[in-house]
Amino acid sequence: MENKEVVITRDLTTGYRKGKREWIITDRLSTSLREGEFVSLLGPNGAGKSTLLRTLAGFQSPLGGQVLIEGVDLSEMNPRDLARTVSVVLTEKTQIDNMNVEALVGLGRAPYTGFWGTLDPKDREVVESAMRLTGIENMRKREVQSLSDGERQKVMIAKALAQSTPVIFLDEPTAFLDYPSKVEIMLLLARLAKEERKTIFMSTHDIDIALQLSSRIWLMDKKEGVTIGSHRELTDSGALERYFLRPGIGFDRESGRFFVS
């Protein structure tokens, strides 16, 4: 039996509107994200990945269609309900000084306590669990500015977990990391999706790692649109080659891996 659909798009059109003009990026996209899935959004710069992700997360209104999460249209959610439904980890490095790791993770409880609210025992239990799941318990008292990029990203994922949402969206979470840290973060996200039954959707340029670890892939390109499938399905259909082959890049269909030719 398939896991339940958590995020559903119905004829979703994303893009921008300025005056009477519209710039369409994705057109009438109807699909879903399921409970326990780790899904990667891949595509070249300028394809509109961030716009699609922001629309799915409720940060930007669609040009048409709907995004429903657990059966509720995002347009009908107030800010607090949205914050209890979706957590987001953005590309930008967090510029927070004079705050320790535990306090930053605790900010994930703001939708339940208010920004300046006091954490009750239940809130502290959730924060403790989030730090344990991300393996950062031993750095709880460290100042955020002392962390490496990889450590800081784990803290931001822990903060998203502390928000207790069914869905986590991440925009280029490995952008500033070295290769071992990229792998570590993606392994963490794949494990959280599987073990904690989170729906995790991530945009990334780290194609090879994403292809190996993701439940499904969304390929996005201005010309090709959005194509969705498993690594094997996209390899067998030739979609991966269509989206990414360029001069100097080869693709091995048997392994589903790219190489420098």
Image (cartoon, rainbow, N blue to C red):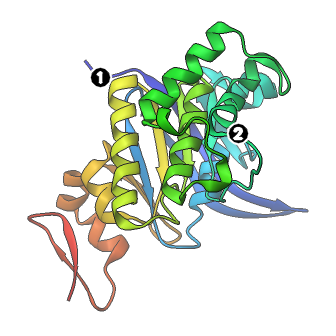
Locate residue 31, reporting x and y percent.
Answer: 46, 39
Distance from disc 2 to disc 1, alpha carbons, whole Å, reads 26 Å
- Mark found first going from the N terminus, 2 or 1: 1
Q: Is 110 located above or below residue 152 in the figure?
A: above
The residue lying furthest to the left in this view is 254
Q: On residue 126, which mark appears?
A: none
Secondary structure of the residue carrying numbered label 2 = loop
Secondary structure of the residue carrying numbered label 1 = loop
Q: Quadrant of residue 159?
A: top right
Of the residues shown, which amino acid type is indicated by label 1? Glu
- Looking at the rendering, in which quadrant would you find the N terminus? top left
Q: Quadrant of residue 252?
A: bottom left
- Looking at the rendering, in which quadrant would you find the C terminus? bottom left
Locate residue 134, reporting x and y percent.
Answer: 44, 36
Would residue 69 be seen by someone viewing this image from the given angle?
Answer: no
Of the residues shown, which amino acid type is indicated by label 2? Gly
Which residue in the structure is indicated by mark 2? Answer: 58
Nearest the camera: 158 or 64? 158
Residue found at x 34% / y 85%: 246
Residue found at x 83% / y 19%: 117
Q: Quadrant of residue 158?
A: top right
Q: Residues within 10 Å of mark 1 (few under 14, many from 20)?
A: few
Nearest the camera: 237 or 88? 88
Locate residue 210, reporting x and y percent.
Answer: 34, 56
Residue found at x 73% / y 49%: 63
Q: Residues within 10 Å of mark 2 (few under 14, many from 20)?
A: some
Residue found at x 59% / y 72%: 46
Which residue in the structure is indicated by mark 1? Answer: 2
Would residue 251 be seen by someone viewing this image from the given angle?
Answer: yes
